[in-house]
Image: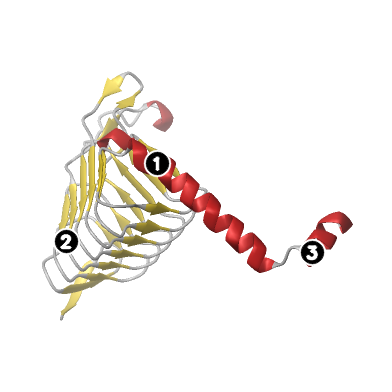
Amino acid sequence: MNFLKALSYVFGYRFFKKISIIVDRLFSYSLNRGLKKVDGYALFQFPSRVEGTEFIEIGKDFQSGKNLRLQAINVYKKFRFNPEIKIGNNVTINPNCQISAINSIKIGNDVLIASYVFISDHSHGKHDFSDISVKPIERILDSKGGIVIGDNTWIGQGVSILSNVKIGKNVIIGANSVIVKDIPDNAIVVGVPGKVIKFT
């Protein structure tokens, strides 16, 4: 501990900040090479976990915070899927978010996603609960439909967006809301489940 403390005096915060920037860039370049399509350069902060890069497309000026979990799942327990994740231009995702698809997730341009947001087009188990007696970890992945998030949408901290949902343009979703049905353009939504409280 004393050795680490001594190092902190020799190498200050600025030094480690520069190192982290270099690590982020190297990590991002390695991920960019595997993406199905990327327009320019997508910045991922390390550490993050990106799976199924060959099914993921990202537009210009993308950046994500640490601990992003971005998954396009094409195989799970011998079941095969045809996933797609398409992210538009100028999208910012803050730290500790999860975006997971076995079907389709499309995020428009100029979307801001706060921390701890969960977006998934599937769940463990059939949506009609016919396999409820099966252990959760052993259930198949099932999707009721894809997710579309419109341009210029702001998704607040801790929001969950579940399958078969279309969110319009210019939408604001309040913190900790759970979105289970479509949202029209220009709506402000809060609550569990999310409800429109106002239009802008």
Residue closer to the observer: 124 or 30? 30
Estimate the x, y position of residue 70 in percent, counting from the top left. Answer: 37, 45
Residue closer to the observer: 16 or 114? 16
Quadrant housing residue 97: bottom left
Dot 2: few (<14), some (14–19), or many (≥20) neighbours within 10 Å? many
Distance of label 1 from label 3 (alpha carbons): 33 Å
Secondary element type, mark 1:
helix
Instruction: Give me the residue at 42% from left, 62% from top.
Output: 115
User: Which residue is identified by label 3?
Assistant: 10
Dot 1: few (<14), some (14–19), or many (≥20) neighbours within 10 Å? some
Instruction: Give me the residue at 47% from left, 51% from top.
Output: 25
- Looking at the image, do the residues carrying marks 1 and 3 touch, with CB atoms under 8 Å apart? no
Which tag is nearer the camera, tag 1 or tag 3? 3
Dot 3: few (<14), some (14–19), or many (≥20) neighbours within 10 Å? few
Quadrant housing residue 12: bottom right
Query: Which quadrant does the N terminus fall into?
Result: bottom right
Which tag is nearer the camera, tag 3 or tag 2? 3
Amino acid under label 1?
A: Leu
In this rendering, the answer to whether 38 lies above or below 128 is: below
Left or right relative to 185: residue 112:
right
Distance of label 2 from label 1 (alpha carbons): 25 Å
In this rendering, the answer to whether 91 lies above or below 127 is: below
Q: Return the disc, 2 or 1, that comes first in the chain's sequence.
A: 1
User: Which residue is identified by label 1?
Assistant: 31
User: Which residue is identified by label 2?
Assistant: 150
Amino acid under label 2?
A: Gly
Q: Return the disc, 3 or 2, that comes first in the chain's sequence.
A: 3
Q: Is residue 48 visible?
A: no
Query: Which quadrant does the C terminus fall into?
Result: bottom left
> Hey, which residue is sitting farthest top in the picture?
78
Q: Return the disc, 1 or 3, that comes first in the chain's sequence.
A: 3
- Looking at the image, do the residues carrying marks 3 and 2 touch, with CB atoms under 8 Å apart? no
